[in-house]
Amino acid sequence: MTSSNAPLAFVIGQPIAHSRSPLLHGYWLKALGMVGAYERREVSPEGLPRFFAEMRDGHFAGCNVTVPHKEKTLSLVEEATAAARAIGAVNTVWREYDRLIGDNTDAYGFLTNLDERAPGWDSRGRQAVVLGAGGAARAVVFSLLSRGFHITILNRTTERAEALARQFGAQVAAASLRDMERLLGTCDLLVNTTSLGMQGKPALELDLAALRAGAIVNDIVYVPLETALLRTARARGHVTIDGLGMLIHQAVPGFERWFGARPVPDADLRAILEADIAATG
Ligand code: ATR
């Protein structure tokens, strides 16, 4: 139970039943002994303006935004952070008086996960290969640019990779899948941002024989926790990083905005999420 003026936040999307965000925020509310609530709410594209109007009127503190509303939300908030504008999508909204502020915390989550799982990952070589050219790739490219990386984007649809590279400037290039072997040979970090390897999707079939020995491999997929890509990379002796930490860390800034305390992700939370993934997929 929460008192009537306790802060309330939502995760909105369509569908929304599978979101693990309530598990995450619920854990922190309890661990920190805080008054507040975090709930799923299914919102249709047509219902989005009305939802934000309610937020402006003070009915709740804020929300996370997921598929299919991340891009549209950018045009519905009064102000967007530099990250949200560069990525072209909003995943976290809070209210300041009657103005809504939109942020994109995926970049923060992505970088914090790598910093945690592979300290010093960005202080050796700075050549990255990013697989995919969708919304998740935009957040990853934006993140890696902030750490001084040179990035090559590879994607099934080459034109999408080229468009993304153009948007981000000289440090970012697009290449054809035919160049994969050559690029893997000089790569320090390989990131999968495609939906391949996700439960219910085809596996990402990638020959890692050419991958440079010291390269780190990160898959932002977290269901399953260890994708075929990570399994193959681990067997070849690469440092591998799954996507669960990105999910956890991207949630931190929103929690702090809505509920007023900054949670510190701990091993218990990760264990709870791992168990939930193992049980429900
Ligand atoms: P998100 O916003 O989660 O990144 P998206 O914009 O739909 O989602 O992008 C999905 C990415 O996975 C794209 O890079 C997509 O490649 P295309 O741009 O060629 O569509 C990639 N992807 C999805 N299914 C794929 C498949 N069967 N083979 C190769 N790439 C695939």
Image (cartoon, rainbow, N blue to C red):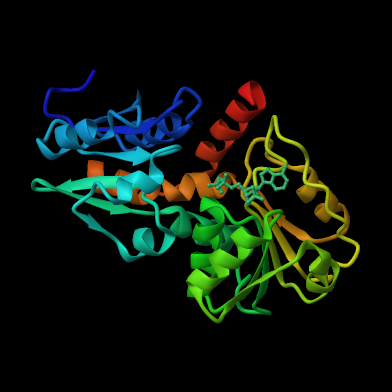
Compared to residue 41, the image places residue 83 above or below, namely below
Left or right position of 231 against 250: right
Q: Tell me if I can see residue 234 in this picture.
A: yes
Q: Residue at x 77, y 46 (%)?
A: 204
Question: Which quarter of the picture shows residue 178?
Answer: bottom right
Q: Residue at x 44, y 37 (%)?
A: 68
Query: How far across and down, in percent of the image, does residue 256 sit?
Result: 29, 48
Query: How far across and down, in percent of the image, does residue 266 sit?
Result: 49, 45
Question: Which quarter of the picture shows residue 148?
Answer: bottom right
Left or right position of 183 against 3: right
Left or right position of 204 against 275: right
Quadrant of the image containing the C terminus: top right
Compared to residue 54, the image places residue 193 above or below, namely below
Q: Residue at x 24, y 42 (%)?
A: 258
Q: Tell me if I can see residue 91 in this picture.
A: no
Left or right position of 229 against 248: right
Quadrant of the image containing the N terminus: top left
